[in-house]
Amino acid sequence: MSSPIFATIFLVVFTFVTCTEGAPRAFFVFGDSLVDNGNNNYLLTSARADSPPYGIDYPTHRPTGRFSNGFNIPDLISQELGAEPTLPYLDPELTGDKLLVGANFASAGIGILNDTGVQFANIIRISQQLRNFEQYQARVSALLGEEQTQMLVNKALVLITLGGNDYVNNYFFTPVSARRLQYNLQDFSVYIISEYRKILMRLYDLGARRVLVTGSGPLGCVPSSLASRSTNGECAEEPQRASAIFNPLLVQMIQSLNQELGSDIFVAANAVDMQNDFIRDPQAFGFITSKVACCGQGPYNGVGICTVASNLCPNRDLYAFWDPFHPTERANKIIVQTIFTGSDKYMTPMNLSTIMAIDSL
């Protein structure tokens, strides 16, 4: 008769082998509301998407904490990887075998800077997300041992999305913000890119070896900017200029980091160009509008947040924007497809399909 200790060790090793042999690579997600899939549901914060009509097109037709009518970008990447979606790190169900799938550490409202999103009070800033990643690795090490855990992390795909809130919920948040008094737009952008570099290096130090880094979207063209800053429906000039400065600086920084590390660790996704395509010509992508949010109120449905009392469009697939800030599931699908198959106009130094092919050799 085998001892209970031997049986337990055998079960853990057997579980790891059966869950990892031929299984999709682990997937880790860091960032803000574009990629949060429910962490903020567990926090006392106003930055939550836990009430209808959020989630109206999700399989359960219920709000999940995703800032979307349905699936968000990490969900759609997981589907392309052939994996189940990662659970929020704060979800009590993230235990045992589910840890091997990866984890989502993202939290709506955060930015590169710690003073971004202070109005939301209790959110998981990026420094804490990285500490949670360390904690995650310790939990997996208790299951598999350090060597196997390091292998799982090294082989994983990592997605990080930061930057937009540093403009929307910091630099531009009030007509005269502390950061505006401190920096002009160019210098502020250079500063947050230098801080972003430190975050990416910390991810590398924690074992990440394939990191997809998305730039900010077209900040001046979201319905919120149109409602508050546009007089004639044209994209608001200053936030749009911020995106135009931030994204090229991000690509340059990532090229420099990869050169320094001697490997294509980081991959930049030019989110502003991806979204500008369907903002300039929504009909070409099957949208009836890229200006009006599906859910909201006021001009362009861009005022405030999406609630039960908001206007709600009957067919979300016809709208590029779900709420004043976030793309619809269908727009997210276009973005993810471009991440996987897009040219070097969108993906630097290569797209995700190419990475998958290289990593499978």
Image: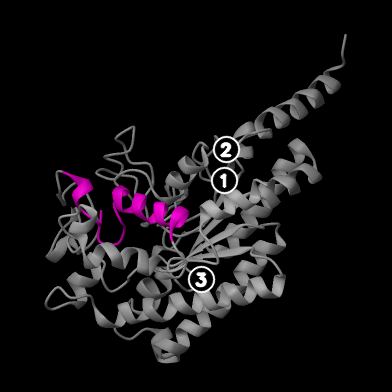
Specify whether residue 32 is painted magenta. Answer: no
Q: Mark number for residue 103?
A: 1
Structural distance between the alpha carbons of marks 2 and 3: 26 Å
Which residue is nearer to you in this view: 105 or 118?
A: 105
Q: Which residue is mark 3?
A: 112
Q: Which residue is mark 2?
A: 94
Q: Amino acid type of disc 3?
A: Ile
Which residue is nearer to you in this view: 246 or 136?
A: 246
Q: Are marks 1 and 2 in contact (CB under 8 Å)?
A: yes
Q: Amino acid type of disc 1?
A: Ala
Specify start and end residues of the magenta stretch as a single range: 315-342
| On-image quarter of the N terminus | top right
Is residue 70 among what the camera can see?
yes
Q: Earlier in the sequence, mark 2 or mark 3?
A: 2
x 42%, y 58%: residue: 108
Specify whether residue 341 is painted magenta. Answer: yes
x 77%, y 29%: residue: 13
